[in-house]
Image (spheres, grey):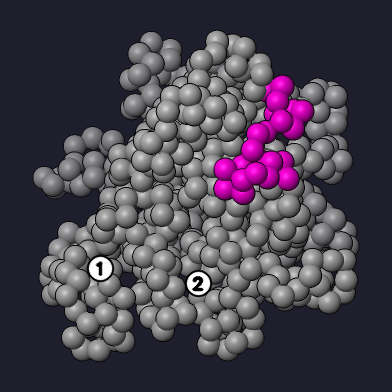
Amino acid sequence: MKYFRQRLGFFVMTLWACITINFVLPRVMPGNAAIDMMARFKGEISPATYHAMALALGVQTRQNLVSAYVHYVADLFTGHLGVSATFFPRSVVSVVGASLPWTLGLVGITTVLAYVLGTLIGILGAWRRGGKLDSLLPPIFIITSAFPYFFTALLAILLFAIKLHWLPTGFGYSPEAKIAMTWSFAGDVLYHAFLPALTILITATGGWILTMRNNMITTLADDYVTMARAKGLSPRRIMFDYAGRNAILPNLTGFAMSLGFVVSGAVLVEYVFSYPGIGYTLLLAVQNGDYNLMQALFFLITLCVLVAVLVMDLVTVLVDPRTREQG
Amino acid sequence: MTGPTTRGEAPVADRLRSGAFYNVTRAVLSNRKATVGLGLLLVFVVLSLFPGLVARDSPTADTFTPSLGPSLSHLLGTTSYGQDVFAQLVYGTRESLVIAIVAGLLATALAVFMGVTSAFVGGTVDHALSMVIDTFLVLPAFPLIIVIAAYTKHASNGVLIAVLVVTGWSYGARTLRAQALSLRNRDFIIAARVRRERTWRLITFEVLPNMTSLILASFLGAALFSVLAAAGLQFIGLGNPDAQSWGTMLYWAQNSEALQAGMPLWAIMPGLCLALLGASFALLNYAFDEIGNPALRPVRMRRGR
């Protein structure tokens, strides 16, 4: 499986790039967590206290770069990510662990939904080219896909939460609700997730519609589609099994590639809705100069995207026999 | 072409007509999406060049009655700091547009360089460069921008543009590489190689003119990305808080809870302007896609009317 090996190699390579960025950035940029702390205490700190604080916050002051790098990677994989300055004295791992389910639920589900929805509309639009669906939706979605996520989010809040009072303006759950595995809590979570989910859907679906429609149009012009029509196959079968199946292939890679964009946009959506996920926590970490937490979150976000890319590559192997034959 | 022509101006016209610039202009004007996009963009360009013509008040004046609703003297009302929203909006155009265009141009230059080099040098260099391009493509750009900006603290526009270029060039590089690869073995390129044209000459005079629409498309894509990313960064407070830009306006509006406090225009209008500027880039981009790929052009359903 040459293809599989290549994709796995790419996964490892990108993961390494991400880890290295995380390692190098704090060392080439000015400032660290301990210096920030110093600034907060207006310099009334003795060098000894500074040193102790730097140790506690995991700021490496003097160390050989190579051994620092090895330690860094080892700590990363054993989950020793230090203490969070924002949520002191909680560890970075526990903070990240608490926010991850929120993002996986919200962003994971909406991304897949947007993709499936966009692909279906794209197939139908290209099939009935110039029809009602096709002349209405693509132009609308070209425009909405260029909207900043936070603009759609602000509009949604203004309309549904402030004017109509249908839905809450933000947060993942009601302040009085108890976090528990009960139906009422699940309902509360869904109630709060509706607006952020809608925002991501509106902005993210457009891109998939457009790319899928374009692929489909190119595929529909192919000879084997004409042949299938000549054989008198049912339109459904031609649309999904003949044209759709081939048109979706470039779009699968596209899904993996543009996942980074969706995740990026979701960070802002979480911020606008104060949704207690990874993105919101990342911004809290940034505002508080919490470098340990920030690095861990960036690593985690990248890891999620890379895993999704790898999964997509494997799906491509399953759907496209040509990638299997090469190996 | 076919010998001397009878009319004196014809050679010039011929040259113009065959020029890439002329082709692009004609294509833009004959495509409705492109015309709308270009119109929107022109409005913003005029606003950014002559903000004083449209807005009477200074964007920095904070002497008005705070939190006013829209009226004739304050078209979009005032902020809770006593500034005129309309003036801030008009004066904010320049920075958003300049960041988009400068970052877009630099990112495109990098994309052309990386993509074309990768395709034309080939071999190990191509493998290595493709790997770099793909790596930058999948790294989630906005979180990366946030992390870099967090270390630099209230990023100046120079830093902001540098970060946007680093994170925004890869998509264009990927499509340009694919295009350059398909051009590499065309007859006219092989002919030029046989003529022993120098590589840089071959690339600038034979390859690049044939990639005009794709280069324009990657510029528009990069500019769109830069507008949205820069505004997002300023919105969450990682830009310069004193800047005159739409993102900064949104930051202050969000800080004062403008939506809840009954000043929705303060937050919605800069967002709308960003959306419109973004839409103009996206419309132009999509139109160039149609121009480059005739199969995508709109068809009219024939129903024998």
> Disc 1 to disc 2, how far (Cα)?
19 Å
**Figure check: A139 above or below A9:** below
Marker disc for residue A176: none
Q: Which residue is mark 2?
A: A154
Image spot of residue A302 (x, y percent): 65, 39
Mark 2: amino acid:
Leu
Marker disc for residue B88: 1
Task: Please say whether residue B220 is visible from this viewpoint.
Answer: no
Q: Which residues are magenta?
A: A73-94
Callout 2 secondary element: helix
Tally of numbered discs: 2
Image spot of residue A193 (x, y percent): 69, 69
Confirm whether circles 1 and 2 share one chain: no
Q: Nearer the viewer, residue A65 or A38?
A: A38
Task: Please say whether residue A166 is visible from this viewpoint.
Answer: yes
- Identify the residue shown where x is 24% and y is 41%: B15
Mark 1: amino acid:
Gln
Q: Nearer the viewer, residue B2 or A237?
A: A237
> Which quadrant of the figure contains the N terminus of chain A?
top right
Labels 1 and 2 touching (C-beta < 8 A): no
How packed mark 1 is, by other alpha carbons closer than 10 Å (few <14, some 14-19, many 20 or more), is many
Q: Is residue A74 magenta?
A: yes
Q: Is residue B300 magenta?
A: no
- Identify the residue shown where x is 58% and y is 64%: A274
Instruction: Please state if B239 lies on the left or on the right of A257 as rendered.
Output: left
> Which quadrant of the figure contains the C terminus of chain A?
top right
Choose top left, top right, bottom left or bottom right for residue A273.
Answer: bottom right
